Image (cartoon, rainbow, N blue to C red):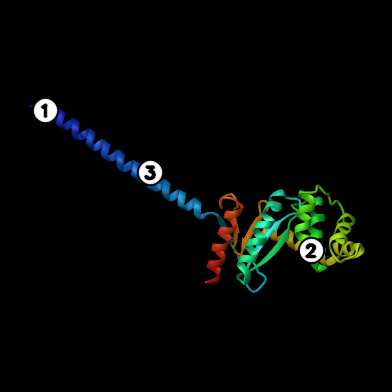
Amino acid sequence: MNLIRRRLSGVFFVGFFVGVSVMALSAIALITASATAVAQEQAYRTLDAPLMTDGDGVEVREFFSYACPHCADFEPQIRAWTERMGDQITVVHTPVTFGRNSWEVLARAYFAADALGIIQDTHTLMFQAIHQQGRQFSDAEAVAEFYASVADVSEQDVVDAMNSFSVTSQINQANRLVGEYGVPGTPAVAVAGKYLIDVRAAGGQAGMLEVAESLVSRESE
């Protein structure tokens, strides 16, 4: 009889241990699932203080550099996405320098083209010239020569625009925005002056635009 009791007790203990183990594993699975869900929700960071935005639609600000190969890959994607989104958004392209002189030349090139009203003629072509044709633009004169060859503008007008006080002010403002948004690299996308999307957490460039679209939808409600 004692032997039977001991065996029954052993069975009960084993059963209890297995039951507790299953419960523990279930709890761990739930915690892991919750952590994964949280991680998936962290595809963007919310700024502590919202920044001023431009345009009638929800502002989508792209931080980029013509020198960045990832930005060159992203350019046709965001261009197509912008066309599809239409009046829902206002896209603002913000060239960054990250303190590099070579990148500042290219940032000045963007702002100069915008000021001269030729940005639609030059923006995509600048990416192609650098990343497909291997061209380098080390100074304003090199940019001016290229712009004059692809748009209705004189080289002197381009040089003057790139060296203007207005473009210098825009460069300074862009640098401040990089700091205020906490931009870690390019390309980066901010939405509504409130959110900065993490391209890696979003699952890549296409995912970054998907997250941007969901945030635009939220802000449009």
Taking the view exactly as shown, the residue that stands out farthest to the top is 3
| 51 relative to 100 in the view: left or right | left
Amino acid type indicated by mark 1? Ile
Say whether residue 169 is visible: no
Residue at 61 percent across and 65 percent down: it is: 84
Say whether residue 24 is visible: yes
Give the label on residue 121, or none: 2
Q: In the structure shown, which secondary structural element does the residue marked by tag 2 occupy?
A: helix
Q: Disc 2 vs disc 1: which is toward the camera?
A: 2
Q: How far is the residue under mark 3 from the one under mark 1?
A: 36 Å
Instruction: Name the residue that disc number 1 marks.
Output: 4
- Please, is residue 137 above or below residue 2 in the view? below
Instruction: Name the residue that disc number 3 marks.
Output: 28
Sequence-wise, the earlier of marks 3 and 1 is 1
Residue at 14 percent across and 28 percent down: it is: 6
Q: How far is the residue under mark 2 from the one under mark 3?
A: 56 Å
Taking the view exactly as shown, the residue that stands out farthest to the left is 1
Q: Disc 2 vs disc 3: which is toward the camera?
A: 2
Residue at 23 percent across and 37 percent down: it is: 16
Specify the quadrant of the image occupied by residue 190: bottom right
